Structure formats: structure tokens, C-alpha cells
Image (spheres, rainbow, N blue to C red):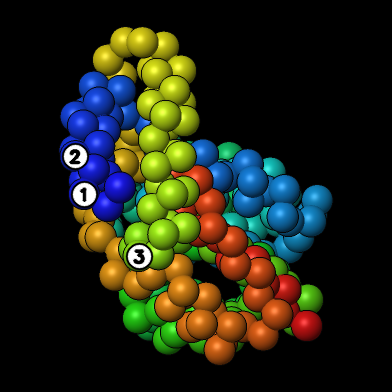
Amino acid sequence: MTTLLPRLFRALDRFHALHPWDHNAHYHRWIMRQLPRHFERALDVGSGSGDLARLLASRATSVQGLDADPAMVARARELTGAALPVRFTAGDALTEIPPGSYDVITCVATLHHLPFSDALTHLRRHLTPGGILVVVGVARAQSRSDHLLGAAAIPMNVAMAWIKSKGRRAPRPVSMTAPTRPATMSFAEILGGARGVLPGVRPRRRLFWRYTLVWHHS
């Protein structure tokens, strides 16, 4: 199976070039289900084109989006306008989070760009007591379970891409144009690292080569 999967992934990449869809945005509604109906301040780390930040604004008094790419920040501002209580800033998630504490912090497909434990520790410092941290991340496939889940995701991934594009060539989503890097940590390493920083954290493997972490600050 491990020798077959790279060939399948190459074929999947070719299919996605014609029928792209955003694996990360697929989890945005799931993220919202983890959150209270209303909260004051939210921080979205790695906010990209701002899709999740705008969703958070439907429940938050104010939302801060932070992304390392100034071009993506400019695009997020353009797409958001002035009507929503959302502010976007370009900066490093380890050193340039806008000051203050947040009731909700979200982080999607960003932690694998950062020193994992340091990033979680830093985000924890910015979370208010009683606040919630929700992470959707990317892990390196290593175990048999990882490869089996990846194989199971392939037909569902093709079906979702076909549905999203309705069988036609689709424009590449804005949030998929940002530079990416492959994940280096396995889910087992992520599990150990997260539990060392966030006691009681709930990590889960997910479809479409993702994992999630949910942590409530006591």
C-alpha cells in the first residue's frame, strides 16, 4: 500500500489541477460547531484570504486575523470590506500577535510552518481563562492507520472535488494560492507534543489528511 499511495497522490494532484477545492475550508463549519454562540474577541492565526475570520465575525464582537503573507492580508481586507468587525494584520504568529487575550483562537493549516510546541505555548498565553483553542493541522503519514485513512480519503476527495466544480474546470480558490510546505511531524508526535503543552487536549485524526485539536483553557 505504501508504494501504491504515492502514485495515487500524483494522480490526485493532476485531478485537482482541473477540479480544485479547499480541504481547509471544508472544516470551517466543523470549527464553528466547537464554539459558543457568542464570544467577545477571536483570533484566527494563518487567516489567509479571511474566510474563517468572516465566519467568526458572525458570532464575535471583534475578530483579529493574522497571516505571515502581506499579499494574503491585503486580499483578505479587500474581500472583507468595512462592514464586519474584522481586522487583518501581517505578522509572525510567534512574535507579532496583537496584544491582549482572546476568547477564541483558531489555527488552520498553519502549525506545520512553525515550531510546534513553541507555537502552542504562545497561543495558550493569549487565550483567556475559559477560552477555546481549535486547530486544524496537517500531519505526516507514518503509521499503518495514517496510510489507511489516507487511502480511504481518496475516493471521497475525488467526489468532493467533482461536486464542488460540478464536473467542470474550476478556478483555484484564493486560499489555496498561498505558499505551503509539507508536514514533518507524524500524528503520534503531534499527539505527544500537544499533550505536553495543553493538558486535556482532544486530538483526532481526520479525513483529507488533516488532524484536529480542541482545548479549553480552565
Few, some or many residues within 10 Å of mark 3 (<14, 14–19, 20+): few
User: Is label 3 or label 1 in front?
Assistant: 1
Please determine whether, in this image, residue 101 is positioned above or below residue 34: below
Label whose residue precedes the other's in the sequence (3 or 1): 1
Few, some or many residues within 10 Å of mark 2 (<14, 14–19, 20+): few
SS for callout 2: helix
Q: Position of residue 133 (x, y in %)?
A: 63, 69
Q: Residue at x 22, y 53 (%)?
A: 179
Q: Give amino acid for label 2.
A: Arg
In-front residue for pair 134/202: 202
Q: Residue at x 72, y 74 (%)?
A: 216
How far apart in space, not on screen, are marks 2 and 3 (Cα)? 17 Å
Q: Identify residue for label 1.
A: 3
Q: Residue at x 38, y 26 (%)?
A: 158
Q: Residue furthest front?
A: 1
Tell me where residue 196 sits by quadrant. Answer: bottom right
Q: Are marks 2 and 1 in contact (CB under 8 Å)?
A: yes
Q: Identify residue for label 2.
A: 7
How far apart in space, not on screen, are marks 2 and 1 (Cα)? 8 Å
Q: Position of residue 195 (x, y in %)?
A: 58, 83
SS for callout 3: loop
How far apart in space, not on screen, are marks 3 and 1 (Cα)? 13 Å
| Residue 109 in sight | no
In-front residue for pair 103/83: 103
Q: Which quarter shows the C terminus?
A: bottom right
Q: Identify residue for label 3.
A: 142
Numbered badge on residue 30: none
Tell me where residue 180 sits by quadrant. Answer: bottom left
Q: Give amino acid for label 1.
A: Thr
Q: Are marks 2 and 3 in contact (CB under 8 Å)?
A: no
User: Is label 2 or label 1 in front?
Assistant: 1
Label whose residue precedes the other's in the sequence (2 or 3): 2
